[in-house]
Amino acid sequence: PRDRGADAGDLPLIEKPDDKWNRSTKTTCRRVGRPRAYQITTKDDSGGLEVILDVYFPLHVTST
């Protein structure tokens, strides 16, 4: 079978892009401007460092 690449269903972080804090994954996920584009935010345990990932499907990840 041909490799189709990753899609939204392959990333558990994107199960519910409702912009609410998910305690089990320690992230929030929300949809951004265009279809199949998401922004995932996470913080380190101290709450100091915040990491934002912009994820586009077909899978392309950039971090800011």
Image: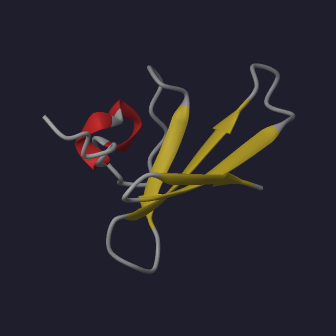
**Farthest residue in the front direction?**
1
Residue 26 higher or lower than 35, as above or below: above
Q: Can you tell which quarter of the image residue 45 is in?
A: top right
**Farthest residue in the right direction?**
48
Q: Residue at x 77, y 42 (%)?
A: 50
52 on left or right of 40: right
Q: Residue at x 33, y 65 (%)?
A: 36
46 on left or right of 54: right
Residue 26 higher or lower than 34, as above or below: above
Q: Residue at x 34, y 32 (%)?
A: 12
Where residue 49 sits in the image (x, y, percent)?
84, 36
Where residue 32 sits in the image (x, y, percent)?
47, 71
Q: How many marks?
A: 0
56 and 42: which is toward the camera: 56
Q: Can you tell which quarter of the image residue 19 is in?
A: bottom left
49 and 21: which is toward the camera: 49
Q: Residue at x 49, y 39 (%)?
A: 21
**Farthest residue in the bottom direction?**
33
49 on left or right of 20: right
Residue 15 higher or lower than 35, as above or below: above
Where residue 35 sits in the image (x, y, percent)?
32, 74
Position of the N terminus, as image quadrant, is top left
Where residue 40 sits in the image (x, y, percent)?
54, 48
Position of the C terminus, as image quadrant, is bottom right
